Image (cartoon, grey):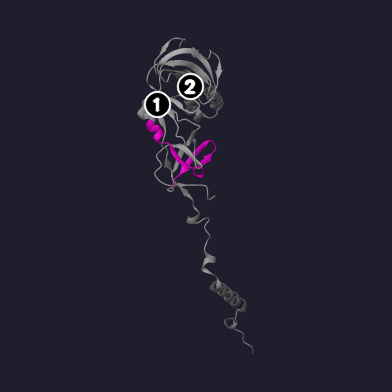
Amino acid sequence: MKITSRSLICPVPIIIILTAMIFISACSSPDETKEELPFTEQEIVTADASEVTGFRYEASPPDTIVLKWSGEGSAVVTGIQISAGEGIEEGDTLFRLLEDLHVVEMERLSMELDMSSAMLASDSLLQPKVDSLTSLLDSLSSNENTQYLSPLQGTALEILIETDQRIRPGNAVLELSVASNELFLVFPPDDCTVNFWPPGGSVFHLVEERDVYAVYSGELPAIEARFSEITAVPRFAVYENELDSYIVTVEYDTISVSRVGEKENNLVIILPSEPVTSDLLTWADK
């Protein structure tokens, strides 16, 4: 009689496979089993920000200033509030304008209100939205005119625009004689080129850009404080996202910046939205 026991049958194929796996694992290098990182610390290139010094400030004698429209887009002059030869105080309303962006926003909201109102009969939950849009449109309609305010004191010499005229950013609107001592000329350092002069603040204003300098009005300490915030960084430390520029610190904090101009040694000068207190990450390693 032949007796066969399953426990005595040797699973040869399984033993061969396990032996091969153990052999391969023993022969593998530890480095081959590690997951490769996309980059190492040695590949990261950082840069530092440096102070920009050398801006010069001069008090301006009595001067004739040409005021310009500096809105975000085109506008139509809806009213002129002054006459030639009239004295003007800082903050006086010179003109009233209807901006294209305002018109586009009102048209968009009107279309949205019409659509929501048409659907209201079948969906009562839209009532709060209809009420909100109606209130917003009423507010925009009552404040549709933008007031163009005088940035400084002086005398209107010549009005350079007319009612119903369409103007674009940079168009001259008024020639103004300034007799006060509130004007200051700001000159860039010899090793810098300024392409964008910083706008004003609450106590000073950018009045006019000229060939190699800019005219500001207001308090000189405030003007000096603003220009002391300007910083120089390597070109590859500034990132771009559509129309926005920003820098990134080594702590991965993002700081928005305005490009001011260029400096020697392939540097750009920027006006950051907050102080830069650490080194910067760059895209030089990308």
Quadrant of the rendered image containing residue 115: top right
Number of residues whose C-alpha sits closer than 10 Å to that of mark 1, classed few (under 14), some (14–19) or many (20 or more): few
Number of residues whose C-alpha sits closer than 10 Å to that of mark 2, classed few (under 14), some (14–19) or many (20 or more): some
Label 1 SS: strand
Q: Position of residue 116 (x, y in %)?
A: 54, 27
Q: Position of residue 98 (x, y in %)?
A: 51, 19
Q: Determine which of the numbered discs, if any, sits on residue 58 in the image.
A: 1
Can you tell which of label 1 and label 2 is closer to the viewer?
1
The three-letter amino acid code for the residue at tag 2 is Leu
Q: Residue at x 49, y 16 (%)?
A: 174
Is 233 above or below relative to 147? below
Q: Inspect this view and state whether residue 259 appears.
A: no
Q: Inspect this view and state whether residue 43 appears.
A: yes
Going from N to C along the chain, the mark reached first, 1 or 2, is: 1
The three-letter amino acid code for the residue at tag 1 is Glu
Instruction: Determine the residue located farthest toward the right in the rendered image.
Output: 1
Which span is picked out in magenta?
224-249
Tell me if residue 114 is in the magenta stretch: no
Quadrant of the rendered image containing residue 166: top right
Q: Position of residue 155 (x, y in %)?
A: 43, 13
| Residue in front for this viewpoint, 151 or 131 | 151
| Residue in front for this viewpoint, 39 or 65 | 65
Instruction: Determine the residue located farthest toward the front in the rendered image.
Output: 190
Q: Determine which of the numbered discs, if any, sits on residue 140 in the image.
A: 2
Is 78 above or below relative to 234? above
Q: Position of residue 189 (x, y in %)?
A: 44, 34
